[in-house]
Structures are given as C-alpha cells and as structure tokens.
Image: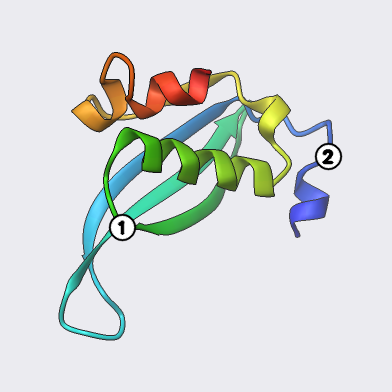
Amino acid sequence: MRASFSSPDVPLTVVHRDRKLLPTLTSKGIVDRLAVLMSGEGTMKLLGVTAMHNGTGEALAAAVFNLVEEWNLTNHLHCMSFDTTVSNTRLFSGACVLLEN
C-alpha cells in the first residue's frame, strides 16, 4: 500500500499533526498519541498514529519525520499545520523549527 501511494505523482504538500491523550487498549491508563496526515489537491492520507513517550519538540519532530520518511513522502512536504503549543513553536527547539532544518 505504501509503495503505491508514494509515487512521484502524489500531490501531497501539507503535513498535519495533533496530539491527544487517549485510553490505552490494554490497561486503564492513558497514552499520548500523535496523529500525522498529509494532504493536498483533494487527497488526504493518514500516515500513522504514534504513541509519544514524551512531548518535547525533538520527539514530535522525529515522530513526524519518521512517518513521512517511511511513506517516501519527504520530497512532497512543503508546509505544516499544527496547534500553537510550546512544543511546536519554541524558537530553537520546537517541532516546527526542527522539521524545517
């Protein structure tokens, strides 16, 4: 499925990400989950929903980059959509800044 979706003709340009605290599937605890999607020109693809062990900008950037890279969509990434929490927008260590670099 990934191979058929990651062709050079895929018009995806925007990566969207958001975190939510959700109940775990195996216990009564909660887990921090990061959903990552890419969209553009009428197409949208859920790349994955990852469990986050910490919410630092570095961890968020690594999780997003790994999913985009797994789908071979790195060259299709032109802009980002995210909420304005500190982990995303911190001047030198926010996920947005780290992904841009």
| Residue closest to the eye, 91 or 10 | 91
Going by the numbered disc 1, the residue's amino acid type is His
Classed neighbour count for the residue bearing mark 1: other residues with Cα under 10 Å, few (<14), some (14–19), many (≥20)? few
The mark closer to the camera, 2 or 1, is: 1
Q: Is residue 85 visible?
A: no
| Residue closest to the eye, 46 or 23 | 23
Residue 18 position in % (x across, y down): 33, 42
**Residue, x 51% and y 55% (percent of image)?**
48
Image height of 54 relative to 18, above or below: below
Image height of 23 relative to 74, above or below: below
Image height of 39 relative to 45, above or below: above
Residue 68 position in % (x across, y down): 61, 41
Residue 14 position in % (x across, y down): 54, 26
Residue 10 circle label: none
**Residue, x 27% and y 29% (percent of image)?**
83
| Colouring scheme applied when the structure was drawn | rainbow
Residue 7 circle label: 2
Q: Secondary structure at mark 2?
A: loop
**Residue, x 57% and y 45% (percent of image)?**
66
